[in-house]
Amino acid sequence: MKKRLFTGIALAAALTLAGCGNSDTTKKETAKADTQTHYPVTIHNVKAPEGGGKWEKKDQVFKAAPKRIMANTRPAAELLLRLGLGDKIVGVGADFGAPDKTVSKAYKKLKILSDQYVGKEVTLGTNPDLVLGRGGLFDNTDWGVGTVDTLNDMGIHTYVLESSIKGGTYDTIYQDIDNIGQIFNMQDKANSFKKELQTKEQNIEHKLASIKENKTFAYLHMFDPENISVYPANDETFFNDAFKKIKMDNVFKQEKGEVSVETLIKTNPDVLIIPKMTEDSPKKADKIIQSLYKNPKLSSMKAIKNKQVYAVDYNYLFGYGYTTIDGMEMLAKEMYPELFK
């Protein structure tokens, strides 16, 4: 009796193990079949001529998922990390600006090429099969990773973040996430991350629902208290769209030339925005804000009288990444603390 019982148990165990083995094999075969049917995949992207100029459409055809990615900025690398692609990143340029703390541990493990923009030689030194990131850095210069055509001619795929070129908006980030999901055949992960960001946007919109009129603002690109420099940001469609998320309008977005301090005073926006860098002491940005409040030339301005000068991290302003919504939320909390209680 005992012998028959033992034999039955052993047989059941063997069948179970065989079933598990078959299940694992089936999963691997299904994944392989899915990969084979997914590729080649064509991604509609862009290119620009050497020295800058108008962006033109250029397709990138992927026969398989890239294995070695060079990210030309920190925000680009963090996007890849959020999509679970950290093991494929072989180098990161422009390591500055506010970090995404949710991937900080993974980011610290990456190979950082420089705290500044990197050139083509450094980029090629990582032996990438995909260079991905901010559009303005795809150029054959000391600070550029090489043009799209140059890299493609060398057999290296490129992906220019659509959010980082003229015409890009915060919603364009969702297009970038979709495209990266297609490139790496990980659409479920991409869709999940999109939903997370969309929920964050909806929450901010709900908090600010009682605000019926947008405030005007001007951006002062200054790191020196003695030098007031107005940047109109007329071509910065992503930048201007991001501020709309918190009901703010760039008062100079139609200006194509220089904007003088006299014009700034005359235009008299509700709010002034200055940049800050995370490597700088927070006291540095505060010093600039205090210098603006004390500047007698600006004393007639609403933003000065009402203490409406705010510092926003550079990556939230010009990183063209998903974390910009975090920066906008932080700014909204400073401006309307009572709405975020």
Image (cartoon, grey):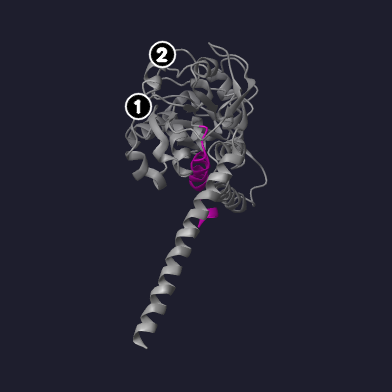
Residue type pointed to by label 1: Asp
Question: Which of the numbered marks, if any, corresponds to residue 132?
Answer: none
Say if the magenta span includes residue 309. no
Between 81 and 220, which is closer to the camera in this rendering? 81
85 lies above or below 138: below
Residue type pointed to by label 2: Asp
| Image quadrant assignment for residue 148 | top right
Rendering coords of residue 248 (x, y %): 60, 38
Residue at 32% over, 34% down: 281
| Image quadrant assignment for residue 120 | top left
Rendering coords of residue 121 (x, y %): 38, 16
Whether residue 55 is visible: yes
Whether residue 99 is visible: no
Rendering coords of residue 156 (x, y %): 49, 22
Between 59 and 246, which is closer to the camera in this rendering? 59
Name the residue furthest bottom: 1
The residue segment tinted magenta is 320-341
Say if the magenta span includes residue 334. yes
Rendering coords of residue 274 (x, y %): 46, 30
Mark 1 and mark 2 residues within 8 Å of each other at the beta carbon: no
Residue at 47% over, 38% down: 80
Does the magenta stretch mainly form a helix, a strand or a loop?
A: helix
Position of the N terminus by quadrant: bottom left
Of callouts 1 and 2, the N-terminal one: 1
**Residue wearing tag 2:** 142
Could you tell me which secondary element the residue under label 1 belongs to? Answer: loop
Question: Which of the numbered marks, if any, corresponds to residue 115?
Answer: 1
Between 248 and 156, which is closer to the camera in this rendering? 156
**Mark 2: few, some, or many residues within 10 Å (few <14, many ≥20)?**
some
Q: CA distance from mark 1 to mark 2?
A: 14 Å
